[in-house]
Image (cartoon, rainbow, N blue to C red):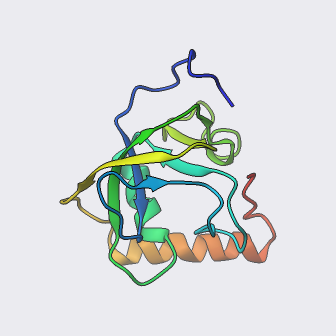
Amino acid sequence: MTGQTEVLDRGPFLHGTKAVLHVGDRLTPDYQSNYQEKRSNHIYFTATLEAAKWGAELAKGDGKERIYLVEPLGPFENDPNLTNQRFPGNPTRSYRSKEPLLIVAELSVWERHSDEMIQQMKDSLAQLTAEGKNVILD
């Protein structure tokens, strides 16, 4: 991971999910991934609202889509699943850490993608999975 001395991004940082969290809670790795049938070694976050919206909308579960303002409590690195594979240079400002994220606030108002766009993305991810191409480097 990148050390704290190298500033990748100053944020603010966001995490999209369906989990019910509260200010002061900590998000930690080693929980069931929203995108694979395994426990994740990292906690993922972003500095763009667009990426956080996708995180909330694509998360497993039937709960309310939520976006939290988070503060990384340790070193973090570019998310190689996006920066190396889909978006070179990290325009999505997507990151991951093995250290916790502190919940600072919940974004109470944001405009979600249309149901049609969300379904298209889910269909696309299902196709990648069927082709064995939806691999997350964790």
Q: What's the residue at 72%, 64% (across, down)? A: 134
Q: Residue furthest top?
A: 5
Q: Is residue 117 above or below residue 16?
A: below
Query: Could you say where residue 69 lies in the image, as x and y percent from the top left?
Result: 32, 47
Taking the spot 29% from the left edge, 65% from the top edge, the residue there is 112
Seen as rendered, the residue at the extreme right is: 132
Instruction: For the N terminus, give its image quadrant.
Output: top right
Residue farthest to the bottom, as pictured: 62
Residue 115 vs residue 49, the one in the foreground: 49
Question: Is residue 29 shown above or below 61?
Answer: above
Q: Position of residue 12 (x, y in %)?
A: 34, 35
**Of residues 49 and 89, which is closer to you in this image?**
49
Tell me: 128 left or right of 87: right
The image shows residue 27, relative to residue 88, as above or below, that is below
The image quadrant of residue 131 is bottom right
State the count of labels.
0
Residue furthest front in the image: 24
Residue at 62% from the left image edge and 65% from the top image edge:
31
Task: Specify whether 42 is left or right of 92.
Answer: right
Q: Position of residue 126 (x, y in %)?
A: 65, 76
Left or right: 114 as drawn, with respect to 137: left
| Whether residue 22 is situated above or below residue 44 in the rendered picture | below
